């Protein structure tokens, strides 16, 4: 998530076909009831809400505004920043932050450390490195090992009294790989609580399809980033989420290799697994968000290992590149 922006652009549509996002295409069929579509910029991303209920976008936007104050890594007044500025002192936090931290710990264990929210200092280091550009050499192993000392999920203690203690000075929690999915899930719950049963929420490619779209499933095309107009497959979604992690937005090329903004926390270096993108379809947008990042880190081999250990109903679409050869792998 990047700095707070609260520009609001509102539009209304009742269209037959509409291009949704960088990652996914959404096909809206001709409907009797017009669909309202509103777009916001929030939490460093765009937020799109489509529903025939005109109240939906405001409810989702309000929920995002509320949660941005909890999860924004770059806002020094957010709850997360307050926590990140402490050391060895229990900090009272919201139940939402506790919930995401607990799930993050679980995902960390399930992915053998590929998913790790305790390495904020490391992720920040690489983001600055990519931003600087003009790369002549990679940072040394010593530099990276030094930063890695400030990581470790075991150094984030979740206490029983809704407090969290960071037990390592310099450790920064970064929820950038999971919070967007969580916000989407919470916004969907907020809609349901207000009696709205049909909507699509898209936060920068993390999508949740609530109910049906005029009795039909919401149809989302999983984009193949290795082809300009390519779609891997159209997915019909009802009460399901789809999220994507990819290296085609933030990356750098060095000595013939593409390095991603997603980092392998075990080596401390950007992922070079040959994965271009991973899309995960699941009932839950939070888990789908976290796992898309983890699968990106560990590639096909890690994904196979995960699925043999944790059989699941998720559908996973992975695009890989080896030399000039690009391949699409579908797991369902
Ligand atoms: P997106 O950029 O679309 O949000 P992700 O959901 O994959 O993509 O999140 C990437 C962000 O998560 C990075 O910008 C960084 O802040 C953080 N991150 C990077 N590597 C990891 C990792 N291995 N585990 C957890 N978080 C990560
Ligand atoms: Mg993610």
Image (cartoon, rainbow, N blue to C red):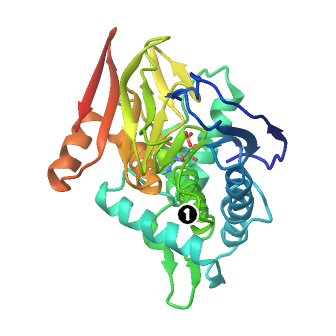
Asked whether residue 86 appears in the rendered view, the answer is yes
Q: Nearer the viewer, residue 126 or 221?
A: 221
Q: Quadrant for the C terminus, please.
A: top left
Figure check: 72 above or below 162: above
Query: Which residue lies most toward the bottom here?
Result: 161
In the rendered image, the residue lying farthest to the right is 7
Q: Tell me residue 86's x, y (percent).
A: 68, 75
Q: Quadrant of residue 234?
A: top left
Residue at position x 71%, y 54% in the image: 55
| Residue 168 shown left or right of residue 128 in the figure | left
Which quarter of the figure has residue 97? Answer: bottom right
Task: In this rendered view, identify the residue nearer to me: 169 or 67.
Answer: 67
Q: Is residue 267 visible?
A: no
For this view, does 105 lie left or right of residue 89? left
Query: Against 224, is 318 above or below?
Result: below
Q: Position of residue 175 (x, y in %)?
A: 57, 57
* Crowd class of label 1 (few under 14; some 14 to 19; many from 20; radius 10 Å): some
Q: Position of residue 121 (x, y in %)?
A: 61, 53
């Amino acid at each position: 998530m990047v700095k707070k922006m609260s520009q609001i652009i509102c539009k209304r549509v009742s269209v037959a076909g509409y291009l949704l996002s960088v990652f996914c295409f959404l096909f809206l069929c001709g409907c009797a009831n017009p669909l309202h579509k509103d777009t916001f910029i929030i939490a460093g991303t765009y937020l799109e809400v489509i529903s025939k209920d005109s109240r939906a976008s405001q409810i989702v936007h309000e929920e995002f505004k509320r949660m941005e104050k909890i999860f924004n890594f770059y806002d020094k007044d957010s709850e997360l920043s307050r926590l990140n500025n402490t050391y060895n002192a229990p900090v009272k936090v919201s139940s939402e932050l506790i919930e995401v931290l607990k799930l993050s710990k679980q995902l960390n264990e399930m992915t053998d450390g590929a998913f790790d929210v305790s390495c904020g200092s490391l992720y920040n280091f690489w983001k600055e490195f990519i931003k600087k550009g003009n790369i002549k050499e990679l940072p040394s192993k010593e530099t990276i090992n030094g930063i890695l000392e400030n990581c470790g999920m075991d150094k984030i203690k979740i206490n029983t009294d809704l407090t969290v203690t960071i037990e390592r000075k310099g450790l920064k929690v970064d929820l950038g790989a999971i919070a967007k999915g969580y916000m989407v899930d919470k916004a969907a719950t907020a809609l349901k609580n207000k009696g709205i049963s049909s909507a699509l929420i898209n936060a920068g490619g993390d999508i949740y399809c609530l109910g049906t779209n005029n009795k039909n499933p919401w149809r989302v095309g999983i984009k193949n980033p290795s082809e300009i107009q390519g779609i891997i497959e159209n997915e019909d979604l009802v009460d399901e989420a789809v999220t994507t992690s990819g290296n085609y937005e933030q990356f750098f090329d060095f000595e013939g290799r593409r390095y991603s903004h997603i980092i392998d926390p075990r080596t401390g270096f950007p992922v070079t697994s040959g994965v271009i993108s991973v899309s995960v379809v699941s009932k839950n947008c939070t888990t789908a968000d976290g796992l898309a990042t983890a699968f990106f880190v560990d590639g096909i081999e890690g994904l196979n290992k995960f699925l043999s250990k944790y059989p699941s109903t998720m559908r996973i679409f992975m695009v890989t590149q080896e030399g000039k050869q690009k391949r699409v792998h579908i797991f369902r």
